[in-house]
Image (cartoon, coloured by chain):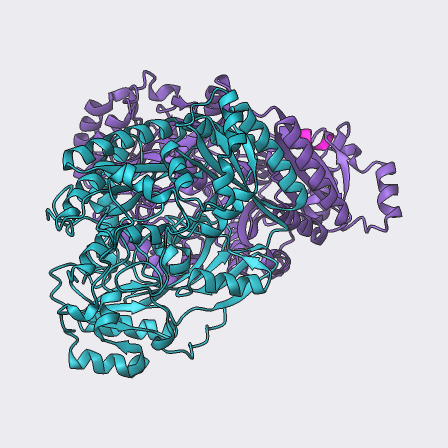
Chain colours: A cyan, B purple
Amino acid sequence: MSTAPQATTTAAEVKHQKWWGWGEEGITWSHADKPKFAPFVMDKLGVDVNLPAPGAPPLRSFDVPESRLSAELRSTLNILVGPANVVTDDESRVVHAYGKGVRDLVRVRRGNFGRLPDAVVYPGGEADVVAIVDAVVAADGVLIPFGGGSNIVAALEALPDEPRQVISIDLGRMNKVLEIDEQSGLARIQAGVLGPDMEEQLNGAGWTLGHFPDSFIWSTLGGWIATRSSGAQSDKYGDIADITRGLRVVLPGEVLVLRPLPSTSTGPSVREMIIGSEGRLGIITEAWVNVHRLAEVREIQAYFFPDYDSGIKAAEQVITSGARPMLLRVSDANETEFSMANGKQSSRVGHLMSQAIQQVMLRKGWDLTKICLSFIGYEGSVSHVRYTKSLVGKIVRANGGMAVGKGPGTLYDQKKFDIPYIRDFLLDRGIPADVSETSTPWSKVKEVHDETVQRAQEAFDAAGHRGFIMCHLSHSYHSGACQYFTFAISDASETNLRSYDTVKRTIQQSFMEHGGTVSHHHGVGEEHSPWMDQDISPAGVHMQAKLFEAVDPGHHLNPGKIVHEGRPGISANSEDA
Amino acid sequence: MSTAPQATTTAAEVKHQKWWGWGEEGITWSHADKPKFAPFVMDKLGVDVNLPAPGAPPLRSFDVPESRLSAELRSTLNILVGPANVVTDDESRVVHAYGKGVRDLVRVRRGNFGRLPDAVVYPGGEADVVAIVDAVVAADGVLIPFGGGSNIVAALEALPDEPRQVISIDLGRMNKVLEIDEQSGLARIQAGVLGPDMEEQLNGAGWTLGHFPDSFIWSTLGGWIATRSSGAQSDKYGDIADITRGLRVVLPGEVLVLRPLPSTSTGPSVREMIIGSEGRLGIITEAWVNVHRLAEVREIQAYFFPDYDSGIKAAEQVITSGARPMLLRVSDANETEFSMANGKQSSRVGHLMSQAIQQVMLRKGWDLTKICLSFIGYEGSVSHVRYTKSLVGKIVRANGGMAVGKGPGTLYDQKKFDIPYIRDFLLDRGIPADVSETSTPWSKVKEVHDETVQRAQEAFDAAGHRGFIMCHLSHSYHSGACQYFTFAISDASETNLRSYDTVKRTIQQSFMEHGGTVSHHHGVGEEHSPWMDQDISPAGVHMQAKLFEAVDPGHHLNPGKIVHEGRPGISANSEDA
């Protein structure tokens, strides 16, 4: 394996998101061309989105805590990677202090910066990473790896009372597709590459990774691996745990090298220890990943089901049938209603519920308040797509569903990365909105959905605020599926994180009690750690804790993540902590 | 989850293999109806298999070391599981001392019993396992879990100089399919169930696990999980690591409970730490596994390719095509010759090379010494099988191959578990034969095959004995494949394990140097541990070692396996150790 070239770029060329929200400065979402959106929000949350929104205050209005980087460590880091790649200005440190969860944004917009990193360091290659890890460990500092900064489970923030120097290690300069093994369908890629940049490099050679999480624009290969990510097309391409075949990881004092292998029986899987390790076992520098030739045909079809049950049953049967669509998404009635309200007047989604289609539904005896929108995607050769679509079509019809064409699917495909901007649009008006997702066996899919929706409604009531929760089935497997919940609570007060926490905790606890996992693909971080005892049992948490302790006895590597070190049931960064 | 019922059977009802060879007493393999077999062995190894064979001496002719079980521990175990389930007779201890690798059988037939277990204990349920683990750890003893006893990588034997009491914990009474979640395609099954018993219970309800390793008759669910096994039909059903969704495992002082989940992002995968742990992290008592409805259609087609290259290329293209056969096996020219020699005169394999077929091959310009036999299996609905077979047929033809019908495939299906009996037939004549398997990316498949065959031939020459090596491609994945080598060395002397070691080590080292793993599905045990540094890098070995140390600081759980504790490059039980 040849050594990766040292990056010739510097930190200044690494793209970052806004310090106060999702995405790049200047890009925002607007409901101007979506006439049904404002009435929808008024109906569900009692909020008038046409009123002027305060938005985020300027960073200079806050008193940003100073860097505590010692002159000695600064000098060492300057020598190792050059002063241009050791950054300590306020905005950089604030950008690297949190991910983009709603709790992160509420806090940062209020000038609650938590324990800011003392420096952001940008290695240009693996040798730099080795040197940085050695130097920071020698200085008894803390290292937190940073990719696109899109984490929403509090995996990027230092412990609030961390007395040691905190170094954020930003992999953004390590952004190259290094090698493609065309015969094997494998690519060797640096960990710091953002999704679009990576796909551009792969597409140029005729390949794709096929990994498209909602965070795609602002997340990196290393981040996907470190959080055990899953993309919208995982039904075809697999989760990142399936996609990742080889790894290079810098541990304190040594470099782990796992060669690319399709499958192996070499004891407890070290590969699977690194996947999901969220920086606690080392810094991922590059990976060998499965890549696929760009498909001959790609299309996303929209379908309607009379209700969520029918849609879930169809999904189960598609999996059993052996058909393998690349995307299988079924929205519940609430999310379907949201999709309708989010359509442009002129778009085909707007036309979805034309008089003609409504008439067909009514003739079928459907209750229009219960209908569910579904997107099913097909990719591959012409004959594969034809065969799969025909199989799926039969199953949809057998479950009472109807196909409504490619138009809405094309639009969905274009708009699929917009949701975080809508979340920020609401937050500009003080309304916290967030997501929680879980996987369960098929036998628990309906139960965990219905119970979670009901308990979230009860939590909204208990908090004394209106709220809205919606859901879609997002990833399917032989034995079960992931469901993805989005919720908002109409509390714009200064203590709204308390209301948010009540709802979020209720949802997570509902997952636990109805056969679900704490997270299917967002990871654990600090946010989900209180439920780990219930998810993988205390013995499982002990095994993870012992592994972290053994590899990193000095607790230099992103301490406090995954293994809960606070009070049971309450995360360290909640309002009640 | 309801508690599993305590077994009502006793140790006496648990089936075991012969102490001196594979399978049950009385079942042997014969070449009487295979006229080409004896000439084949004479040609390749210079051995006349028609001469009388000495076979194994009776056990009573040996001086079997006595059990060192203390009166105190015996009394404790008797109370915990009843005296009928605490066994210390010579034959039971010898049966549980080794697996069924060729080194195991050569040694045991010579009365070299190694460090025999001092007792074999048969728990009737998880509560018994907890009590046994606690009692043995409290007595500072060593615990080695035992399933079907078919391990071939020295994972079942105690360290030769183990001074502590050694307890073999045989899970054979825990053999029930406890529960089937029909909606999810999941079954909860006890770890000690043997393959055929489990399939009988599942088939009775219309289901199958689809996991058929060559050891199937004499291996257990717990053993498959503990060794990270893969079955012949993994191309459809997945490796055991894919199949296993939930687990219960008894660790010292606690029980790990992992609920069945299709996928989860709860940090480093504890599930994947247990899979492949070979008894070093605890005793697996039950698992939730993916199960599938019995297929509507099942058939195995035979094909011929003009050479191994064409067969490999076809396999690559089948994977890329999106077709998913349940079995894809391509023998190299040597193995094809062996298959021809192993056919009954009256069978259809005998007819494979009828004059008519030979004429077709010759007209195509094929070199008959290079032809390669392939079996490709199809399972599913009538339409799925038709679609898949048609796709595969086109690919076979595009690579110069020809279909020769279902007959040989049916025969292969019936005879697929016979190979270990042929191995013992040769061993009865003093000839050691063994298997080694590896996976590589597709780009290394040809290279690792050709280099390994060449280096094995050089090793035969260096050892001064004739030898034979053959191979088939056995499991395919997106990015690569497993190849399975079988070899024999014509050394019937008292020091033949030294010749065997030379060849085995050469093969394993060739895997390492040509992109392969030390084992795709046989596991590590003690036998493969010397290559782990090269396979997963020293940092990977350290991580495994630290995990074992953290969970089991007293080294009570199957010490010495996976992590190499002897001299580099030489395993502790080799002749040179």
Number of numbered discs overlaid on the protein picture:
0
Name the spot of residue A280 as percent of width and height, x first: 27, 58
Q: Quadrant of residue B124 in the image?
A: top left
| Horizontal arrangement in the rendering, residue B309 relative to residue A247 (left or right) | right
Magenta stretch, residue numbers:
B407-411
Q: Would residue A44 be counted in the magenta stretch?
A: no
Name the spot of residue B275 as percent of width and height, x first: 38, 42
Q: Main secondary structure of the magenta part?
A: helix
Q: Would residue B410 be counted in the magenta stretch?
A: yes
Is residue B247 something one can see in this rendering? yes
Q: What residue appears at the point 46 percent right and 35 percent down from the top-left corner?
A: A373
Q: What residue appears at the point 75 percent right and 37 percent down from the top-left corner?
A: B36
Name the spot of residue B335 as percent of width and height, x first: 68, 45
Q: Nearer the viewer, residue B541 or A475?
A: A475
Q: What residue appears at the point 28 percent right and 50 percent down from the top-left corner?
A: A426
Residue B215 lies, with reference to residue A69, above or below; the image says above
